[in-house]
């Protein structure tokens, strides 16, 4: 795994160099979903303190075992899980509905751990079944997050659609980021880029890349 971490760090450095960015601006989040806690512990030892998970049921167990990690929740979030997620997450990347905003704020107040960082997830295609808020609704939802004192609006997040050139998709996300920053200048974070497209994401300004496969290998199928 040490080699994989080095390889991913080198990819991030090369992608930054190609566009004149400082690699220190990019946070590597290792997505450990469907891998055991022992792998997450190894990543921490290898100097990757930011870990990502996509299901509360799995994440809360790992977070209890490894409270020293910074846990990023990146999966679709239901309101009935929001209170649980607020107990261990440092950041939630997948907020796309106002009822989730309210539930997370409620959870963060109860958890008394200080403001919870939130990314508004943006949909980069026109498929309403997919996660994320449409581009024309991003600014309003960002305002809803910013209005909650228990939350801290951090920026925007997206997953590039399969059938779209990632450079085109991430350019749209950069536009959404600019629209949010017009009203919320502190909310400049951009969570974008996975194993297959981290280079395009960094070229488009990503500050947080979410990497699973390139660090840990291929996952088994999702269960449950
Ligand atoms: C699983 C997942 C990732 C990691 O994807 P890889 O292609 O394995 O790097 C990133 N972001 C989200 C939202 C995920 O669910």
Image (spheres, helix red, strand yellow):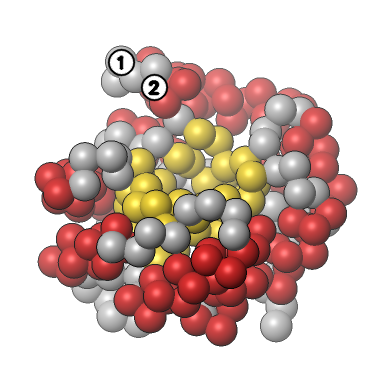
Name the residue tied to disc 2: 16
Structural crowding at the residue carrying mark 2, measured as other residues with C-alpha within 10 Å and reported as few (<14), some (14–19) or many (≥20):
many
Structural crowding at the residue carrying mark 1, measured as other residues with C-alpha within 10 Å and reported as few (<14), some (14–19) or many (≥20):
few
Ligand 1 within 8 Å of the CB at mark 1: no
Instruction: Quadrant for residue 6, please give it.
Output: top right
Q: Is residue 77 visible?
A: no
Residue 113 picture location, percent across and down: 60, 54
Residue 199 picture location, percent across and down: 40, 34
Viewed as shown, does residue 219 lie left or right of 131?
right
C-alpha gap between disc 2 and disc 1: 6 Å
Residue 32 picture location, percent across and down: 69, 52
Viewed as shown, does residue 25 lie left or right of 123?
right
Q: Is residue 181 visible?
A: yes
Give above or below for 173 relative to 143: above
Q: Pick the quarter of the image with the C terminus.
A: bottom right
Viewed as shown, does residue 202 lie left or right of 53?
left
Residue 109 picture location, percent across and down: 52, 66
Name the residue rendered at 80%, 49% in the picture. Answer: 66
Q: Secondary structure at mark 2?
A: helix
Name the residue rendered at 80%, 58% in the picture. Answer: 64
Name the residue rendered at 39%, 52% in the picture. Answer: 152
Q: Secondary structure at mark 1?
A: loop
Residue 20 tag number: 1
User: In the rendered structure, are the residues bearing label 2 and label 1 in contact, judged by CB atoms less than 8 Å apart?
Assistant: yes
């Amino acid at each position: 795994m040490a080699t994989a971490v080095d390889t991913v760090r080198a990819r991030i450095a090369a992608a930054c160099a190609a566009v004149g960015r400082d690699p220190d601006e990019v946070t590597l989040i290792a997505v450990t979903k469907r891998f055991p806690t022992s792998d997450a512990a190894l990543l921490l030892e290898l100097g990757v303190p930011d870990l990502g998970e996509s299901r509360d049921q799995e994440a809360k167990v790992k977070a209890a075992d490894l409270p020293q990690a910074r846990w990023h929740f990146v999966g679709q979030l239901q309101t009935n899980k929001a209170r649980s997620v607020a107990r261990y997450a440092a950041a939630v990347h997948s907020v796309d509905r106002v009822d989730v905003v309210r539930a997370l704020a409620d959870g963060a107040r109860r958890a008394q751990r200080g403001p919870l960082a939130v990314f508004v997830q943006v949909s980069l295609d026109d498929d309403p079944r997919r996660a994320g808020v449409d581009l024309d609704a991003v600014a309003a939802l960002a305002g809803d997050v910013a209005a909650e004192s228990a939350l801290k609006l951090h920026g925007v997040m997206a997953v590039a659609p399969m059938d779209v050139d990632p450079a085109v998709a991430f350019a749209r996300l950069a536009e959404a980021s600019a629209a949010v920053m017009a009203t919320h200048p502190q909310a400049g974070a951009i969570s974008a880029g996975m194993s297959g497209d981290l280079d395009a994401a960094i070229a488009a300004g990503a500050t947080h890349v979410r990497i699973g496969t390139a660090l840990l290998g291929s996952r088994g199928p999702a269960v449950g």
